[in-house]
Image (spheres, helix red, strand yellow):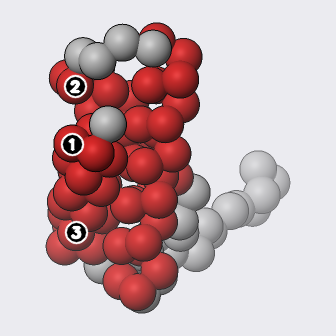
């Protein structure tokens, strides 16, 4: 169980780091993004371990990655202002 938690935390940190490097203009500060990725991965590992209740590390890491990516996607802001023109203009 300790290996699952440590692996999922490292995976969440890696996903958050990659997101901050790839989308720095669309995310808030890295001091918010990095803990969000780790917390999402730990929560995903917990949910997957609880739901499936077996020791397959690969499946648990997939669940951790999915929840971490979902929690990081909630932090993404729009790229710019949406310029909407009316149909009559």
How far apart, in angstroms, are the residues tagged by discs 1 and 3?
A: 21 Å
Label 2 vs label 1, nearer the camera: 1
Q: Which mark is residue 17?
A: 3
Kindly state the secondary structure of the residue where label 1 is placed: helix
First in residue order: circle 2 vs circle 1: 1
Q: Quadrant of the C terminus?
A: bottom right
For the residues labelled 2 and 1, say whether their Cβ atoms are less than 8 Å apart: yes
Q: Residues within 10 Å of mark 2 (few under 14, many from 20)?
A: some
Distance between mark 2 and mark 1 Cα atoms: 9 Å
Coordinates of residue 81 in the picture (x, y in percent): 58, 75
Name the residue carrying label 2.
Answer: 57
- The residue at 47%/80% (across/down) is 32
Quick one: label 1 or label 3, which is nearer the N terminus?
A: 1
The location of residue 35, given as percent across then percent down, is: 42, 72
Q: Secondary structure at mark 3?
A: helix
Q: Give the Cα distance between marks 2 and 3.
A: 22 Å
Tell me the residue that label 1 is attached to. Answer: 3
Above or below residue 53? Residue 45 is below
Residue 60 in the image: state x and y as whole percent.
Answer: 32, 27
């Amino acid at each position: 169980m300790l290996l699952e938690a440590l692996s999922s935390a490292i995976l969440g940190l890696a996903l958050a780091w990659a997101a901050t490097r790839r989308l720095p203009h669309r995310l808030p500060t890295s001091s918010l993004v990095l803990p969000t990725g780790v917390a999402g991965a730990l929560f995903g590992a917990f949910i997957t371990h609880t739901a499936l209740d077996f020791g397959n590390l690969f499946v648990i890491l997939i669940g951790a990655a999915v929840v971490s990516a979902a929690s990081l996607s909630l932090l993404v802001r729009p790229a710019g202002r949406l310029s909407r023109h009316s149909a009559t203009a």
